[in-house]
Structure formats: C-alpha cells, structure tokens
C-alpha cells in the first residue's frame, strides 16, 4: 500500500499531458501485445495443422503401398513408386518398422538409422515432433500405426517432411506482427499526442489569459471582459467562475483602497483644525483636542467596520443574520434627531409602501446603518424644516439582461432644502466633492452610500422630491428576506 501511494504521488508530479498519454498508451500496449500474441499462436497452429495434414496424407499413401514378403519374409515396397520420397536426401523421408524388420524410403539411401531421434513435440502441434535430417536440415516427423498384409502385420510408420519453409513462414509472420504492432503503437502515440494537444489547448489559452492579467500592459480593471475570450465549451464553467472570482477580488481591493482614501480624506479636517488652532495660539484647549481625537477615533472605527464588512462575505447579503429594517431605521433616525437637535427638524419615518409584518434584510447591519446615517445626516444639514425616510420593496426582476434577481429593499430619503441643480445632480457622488464649504462635512456620504448599494447588487439614484421639493435619494439594496 505504501509503495502504491509513493508511486501515485510520483505520477501526480508528472505533467498532465504525460499522464494522459500514458493512460492512453499503456492499455493500448497491453491490448496490442496480448492480441498480437494470440494472433501469432493461432497462425502458427494453423500452419502446423496444415503441415500435419500433409504428413498424414503422405503416411496413408506410403502405408497403402507397403507389402509383406512371401511367407512373411520381411517388409517391402510396391514396385514402380516414384514420388518425393525417391529423391535422395530430398527432405522427404519415411521409415517403417515391424518388430526387428525395418524398411525405409529410397531418399534415405543407405542410412539404417532414422534421421535422428525425435527431439520433442513441436510447439503448437503435439502430434508432430522435431527432427534433423541427414543433411542437418530441420524436419517434422509424424508417427502412425499401419496394418500391412496380408498376412496382417502391425508396423510403425514415421514420415518426415522438411520444416525449413514452414519455419521461414512462421518467422515472417512474427516479423509482420511485430512491425504491425510497432506501427499501431506509433499511430496510437501520434493520435494520443494530437488528442492531448487539441484537448489541452483550451487550458493553454486560459493559462495565457491568466498570464496576461499579470503583464504590465494587462487588461486592467476589465478582468471579466478579458476572461470572456472563448476557450472551449468544457472550460466555460471554470472560466466563468475564475472571471467572477477575479472580478470580486478586484472589487474588494478597489473598495479597500476607497476606504483608505475615504479615511485619509476624513481625517484631514480634524487634523487641519488642530493645526490651525495650534498655529493661532500657543496652547490648544484640552477639550478641543479631546473632541477632535474622539472624532478621529470614531472615523477609524467606522472605516474599520466597513472594511471588515467587505471581508466577511464574498457575496454581499449571503451571510449573517437578517436585519430588522424598521428597528434599525428607527434607531438611526433617533440618533440623527439628537445630532441635529439645534435645527428643530421634523424627522418622519414612512413605511406605508412596505409590506405588513417584519421587514428583514439579509446583509451587514453596519452597512445598513452606514447608508442610513450618511443619507439622513446629509439631509439634516440641508433641510429647512423636515426630513422624511420612506421604506419600500421593489419586486423581483432582471438586471442587465442577467437572470432574475430577488426583491430589493428600497430606502428613500427626502428633505425640503434647496435641492440640486441638474449639473450638481450629474456630479454628485464624486468622492470629496462638496457644493458648499460652509456646511460641515467631508463630501463622502453619497459616494459611500452608492458604493455599499453596488456591493449588494443595488444602486443609488438622485432626483427632486415631489413632496418636499428638495433632494430625493433613492437606494436599492438586494437581499430582502421574503419568507
């Protein structure tokens, strides 16, 4: 077992093409070898059987012309018989023996002894025996019992025939079979090599596509389109999974970079304030330092939570317990009401468009709080007297020609502030972009909310509120729990 495991590990280290060729050629080699050997045996036996039949016929013909002398005076051959047994040392011989009486063919001339004692049965023909003739030529012998008479005499007749031509035919068969086996194995090897080249070509194309991703002048962020190049039907599922994995990794990296940029941008303001106060006066009040330090610590915790939220799920909304949307929205709304208490705004929660019963969303609570906090905080800064948060549900549908998506959670935040001009609506959402520097903020709220919406397969849209006449922000988040 240990030897087999070591052998399997060694074979696993070989290239895939080599293993495939071996798996194709080794069974072929076994089949060709076994089939060739069986065919050789059958053909040899056929030749020997034919030669045996020839010797049997000649033995019958010789036995028919053997006679017993008068008053049993020895064996003799019928006169006038001229055939292949008449040529001296011609390769065809016979010898008959009845007791001590021996009669031999004319071709043996004056040899009293048989060509040689039988050397053993011929392979594949147990009736025939190997022998050597007077000229040291190879012979095959056939032995039979004959009745000679009258008077009836039991005799043993041995007929010899030349085996050189038969052996040459057998060797020619062996050479032909070996050449045929070699040609067949060469053809099988060429076909296996061609099959490996053609069969593994999609893998090589996929390898080239993946290698191009690491090149300095690679496809950049357009990984999915780059990996959409055809590599073969069999690899399409693997190719699609790789494209999705790489696109997701690129998305995660982009979000991580965006978090770093956002954090850097957000920390600049408290640091700038501390620097300005330190430049204006020798001593900065401890309360102001603590307030700005606390703000920076809160920013760090906030972006750390967002980064952890990205790392927890490969597919947004697929992990974690469902979030009670109404309860989460109510808490964020109360927090915003306390934060903007000085403005004395009316904060309204409208869930009339949402279905009755629990409204649950499968996602990270920190992401939902981030979206609601950014949108409501932005609305509170610009609103004149009222901010309205509406909860709703969008039915399942198709997205960008892809398969059907589940229902989406809809968050709509409106205010009665000045709103935005068409040009501002077009530019809104860019990182760090602020339309009024007198209003406190970092210019990242809409960008962060839009990024989170995209991570959950949704989107963020800006428009004019039909009821409050200010800005309307509509966010769709996939992952609504329907059961």
Image: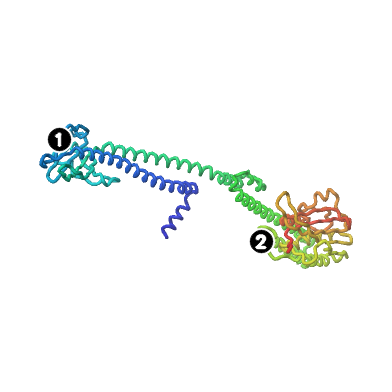
**Is 466 situated above or below 32?**
below
Q: Quadrant of residue 459?
A: bottom right
Relative depth, front residue between 252 and 190: 190
Mark 2 nearby-residue class (10 Å; few <14, some 14–19, many ≥20) = few
Name the spot of residue 480 as percent of width and height, x first: 74, 61
Q: Quadrant of residue 334?
A: bottom right
Q: Is residue 135 left or right of residue 53?
A: left
User: Which quadrant of the figure has residue 113?
Assistant: top left
Q: Nearer the viewer, residue 32 or 276?
A: 32
Residue 192, image x, y percentages: 48, 43
Q: Nearer the viewer, mark 2 or mark 1?
A: 1
From the viewer's perspective, tell me whether residue 292 is left or right of residue 114: right
Which residue position is annotated with label 2? Answer: 312
Determine which of the numbered discs, if any, sits on residue 109 in the image. 1
- Between 156 and 4, the residue placed more toward the observer is 156
Judge whether residue 360 can be spotted in this image: yes
Above or below, comparing residue 333 to residue 134 in the picture: below
Q: Position of residue 414 (x, y in %)?
A: 85, 58
Which residue is at 61% across, 48% downward? Answer: 236
Q: Position of residue 122 (x, y in %)?
A: 26, 45
Residue at 88% over, 62% down: 386
Image quadrant where one finds the C terminus: bottom right
């Amino acid at each position: 077992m240990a030897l087999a495991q070591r052998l399997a590990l060694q074979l696993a280290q070989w290239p895939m093409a080599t293993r495939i060729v071996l798996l194709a050629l080794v069974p072929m080699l076994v089949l060709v070898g076994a089939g060739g050997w069986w065919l050789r045996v059958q053909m040899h036996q056929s030749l020997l059987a034919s030669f045996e039949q020839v010797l049997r016929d000649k033995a019958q013909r010789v036995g028919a012309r053997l006679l017993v002398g008068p008053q049993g005076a020895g064996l003799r051959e019928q006169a006038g018989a001229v055939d292949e047994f008449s040529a001296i040392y011609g390769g065809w011989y016979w010898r008959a023996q009845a007791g001590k009486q021996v009669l031999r063919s004319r071709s043996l001339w004056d040899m009293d002894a048989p060509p040689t004692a039988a050397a053993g049965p011929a392979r594949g023909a147990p009736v025939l025996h190997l022998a050597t003739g007077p000229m040291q030529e190879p012979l095959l012998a056939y032995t039979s019992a004959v009745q000679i008479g009258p008077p009836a005499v039991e005799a043993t007749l041995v007929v010899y025939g030349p085996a050189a031509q038969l052996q040459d035919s057998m060797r020619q068969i062996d050479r032909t079979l070996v050449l045929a086996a070699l040609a067949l194995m060469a053809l099988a090897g060429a076909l296996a090599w061609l099959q490996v080249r053609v069969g593994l070509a999609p893998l090589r194309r996929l390898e080239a596509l993946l290698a191009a991703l690491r090149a300095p002048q690679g496809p950049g962020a357009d990984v999915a389109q780059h990996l959409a190049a055809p590599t073969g039907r069999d690899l399409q599922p693997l190719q699609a999974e790789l494209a999705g994995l790489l696109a997701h990794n690129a998305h995660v990296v982009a979000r991580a970079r965006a978090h770093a940029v956002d954090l850097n941008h957000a920390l600049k303001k408290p640091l700038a304030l501390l620097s300005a106060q330190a430049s204006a006066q020798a001593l900065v009040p401890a309360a102001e330092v603590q307030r700005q330090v606390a703000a920076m610590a809160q920013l760090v915790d906030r972006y750390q939570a967002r980064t952890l939220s990205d790392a927890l799920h490969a597919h947004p909304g697929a992990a974690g317990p469902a979030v009670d949307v109404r309860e989460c929205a109510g808490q964020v709304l109360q927090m915003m009401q306390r934060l903007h208490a000085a403005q004395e705004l009316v904060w309204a929660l409208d869930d009339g468009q949402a279905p009755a019963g629990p409204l649950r969303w499968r996602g990270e609570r920190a992401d939902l709080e981030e979206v609601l906090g950014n949108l409501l905080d932005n609305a509170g800064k610009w609103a004149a007297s009222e901010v309205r948060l509406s909860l709703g549900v969008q039915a399942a549908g198709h997205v960008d020609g892809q398969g059907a998506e589940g229902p989406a959670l809809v968050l709509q935040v409106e205010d009665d502030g000045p709103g935005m001009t068409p040009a501002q609506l077009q530019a809104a959402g860019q990182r760090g972009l602020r339309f009024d520097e007198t209003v406190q903020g970092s210019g990242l709220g809409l960008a962060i909310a839009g990024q989170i919406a995209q991570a959950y397969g949704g989107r963020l849209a800006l428009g004019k509120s039909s009821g409050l006449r200010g800005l309307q922000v509509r966010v769709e988040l996939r992952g609504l729990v329907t059961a």
